[in-house]
Amino acid sequence: MLDKALKGSRGYWGWLFFLTGVMGAGFLAYLYQFQNGLGVTGLSRDVSWGLYIGQFTFLVGVAASAVMLVIPYYLHDYKKFGKIVILGEFLAISAVTMCILFIFVDMGQPMRIMNVVLHPTLNSVMFWDSVVLSGYLFLNLVIGWVTLESDSKGIKPPQWIKPFIYLSVPWAVSIHTVTAFLYAGIPGRHFWLSAIMAARFLASAFAGGPALLIILALLVRKLTKFDPGKEAIQTLGKIVTYAMFANVFFLGLEFFTAFYSGIPAHQHAFQYLYAGLDGHNKLVPLMWTSSILAVVALFLLIFPSFRKKEGVLAFACVSLFISLWIDKGFGLIIGGFVPNMFERVTEYWPTIPETIITLAVWAAGFFILTVLYKIAVTVREETAGIEIEH
Amino acid sequence: MSMNRREFIKLAGISTLVGVGGVSVFNKLQNNALEASEFTAGPEALNAKQWAMVIDMSKFKTPEDYKRCMDACHSTHNVPDFNNPKDEIKWIWPETFEHAFPGQEHKYMNEETKEKSFLLLCNHCANPACVRVCPTKATFKRKDGVVMQDMHRCIGCRFCMAACPFGARSFNYRSPRGKDANGQPLIKEENTAYPTRMIGVVEKCTFCTERLAVGKLPKCVEVADEFSKGALVFGDLADANSEVRKIINTKYTIRRKPELGTEPSVFYVIGGNDYAIVPELL
């Protein structure tokens, strides 16, 4: 089926060419980082994880969100998701690939990456994260490919794929739970040491991922002859709304515990992020942007009359996605490191090489996504009107 | 032979992968080569179940005292000076009370205690969070309680830096073997008896395992004895007759963040006045 990615419009090739350019710039920036060390980033002794790990965390959520299509379609026989489910699975493949790349560019000794396999360490959450992420990548590759290939031939997918599909449901939950455990099991970082961390991660994932998927589905419909379905997009809109409410509610719970208990150490990170601490307030405008965008998105999503207008829905989804990206892809990680273990404030801001590398990883993800969607869309265009039961 | 070229390459590839991978994993497990590498102990080596340190703050009088311990450690272990807090690497350093023991300070505390510098270093915890999180066993707990680091196995993920509640770990953001902007080497005078590190790995205090292996006390302890006998006392926490245990038995000692359950092995005697000592224990 890969051949379908080789025939495309000028726009398709132009877009891929553009992404390749960004990846090229990122590759050069990475060579610079590889040569000179992570000192070329904004990371420091006090804030030792930053933009890279933030993106990784955020994208694990995007990957996990495919389950929001798989559950209704395969477990509840919700037929309307029949055409869109492949878009979710392929989005997961691209997101997990970006996760792996972000981990790679964050490593001090990337050439030793296989040490994680060579010296498997069962007590390390990071070891388990690598296991569940590679497993999830494998599951989505197999499921996406096999079901799409059957579609292209106009036959039902083989029976043996069913167990893989069912397995992908708890597996999706596991990738984000284990990722949350990277943070939630660390003593002394009060901002992260929260039992609700995994639940928060899942809620924000199930809001942010489907929001991105709605944007992508609307784009696909605009740019190609393939229509993922109006009703499917509306259902996704409802999923986004509920998940975002859960996410904001969970964040509220964190605020309550920190501030009603009155324990200073539990409040510091929130103070730093939303009000500034000891005169340091670099992240305050960003965090408030995130909060305002979240309120705007929720306001537009909560009323069906707004949500049903696709233009409004798209706007709400973009706001929500940016809001969650700031909150989880940036604030959540930096907040864990500020103040540091000595209750001193060291601020962090990404450098230019770090930003270029980050953009390049996103470009790589979009490259994979574009190629996969091209294949899926071409198959769908060829088999338009024929519905195959999975 | 009914195998085409494509099938042959496929088969050859798979068997190579399975063969090479399988054999190497099997060999590793058999030789028990999964233990990370470290200094080998000689016949005169000092042994313990859990090495520990007691730091008597009353015996540190001037900033010079702290500096001597720091400089001795850092020059012995080729700790580079990047001259900026962002890339800083430190194994032992001074920190004021309110930052060394956050949450313990209060607004009525006397200025002397509040401003007093405490000597900080890796706590060599009995239940270390850094060891728990390391994905490659590059940081590990030795039989003598020292939390050790294998520089050749570390992948530089910095999970241990996130996990350590004591900020004891530093990362080589830049190559410590390089030169600064003025062309001066970052390691002022290299001690050829101790390895330098490479870029992209984490490091910290090792309780001088290289010295323990040849029957010597840690460098900072040796230097502290020169200006004030007993300022730093080193010994086995598991041995009831050890010097550290005797001090812990008789004086009121505190540890950093004991509530986190990592069981730090570095104890502080604040001392300096009678109130800091619990009379019943004398």
Image (cartoon, grey):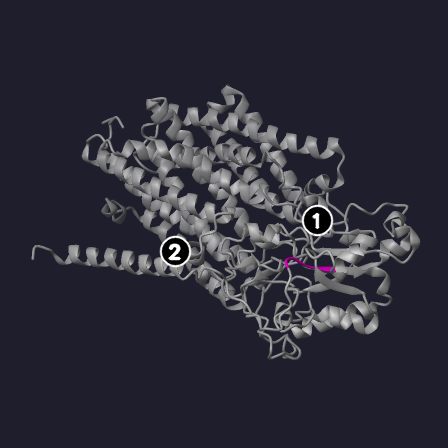
Q: Which residues are magenta?
A: B49-53
* Observer-nearest of A145 and B232: B232
Residue A255 sits above or below residue A113 on the image: above
Quadrant for residue A20, please give it: bottom left
* Observer-nearest of B190 and B252: B252
Residue located 38% across and 59% down the image: B30
Residue located 65% across and 30% down the image: A252
Q: Which residue is mark 1?
A: A339
Quadrant for residue B229, please give it: bottom right
| Mark 2 / mark 1, whichever is N-terminal | 2
Where does the image place residue B177, in percent across and percent down from the top left? 58, 74
> Label 2 amino acid?
Thr
Cβ atoms at labels 2 and 1 below 8 Å apart: no
Residue located 85% across and 45% down the image: B106
Where does the image place residue A89, in percent across and percent down from the top left? 36, 37
Q: Which residue is mark 2?
A: A20
> Label 1 amino acid?
Pro
Is A180 magenta? The answer is no
Quadrant for residue A389, please give it: top left
Labels 2 and 1 within one chain: yes
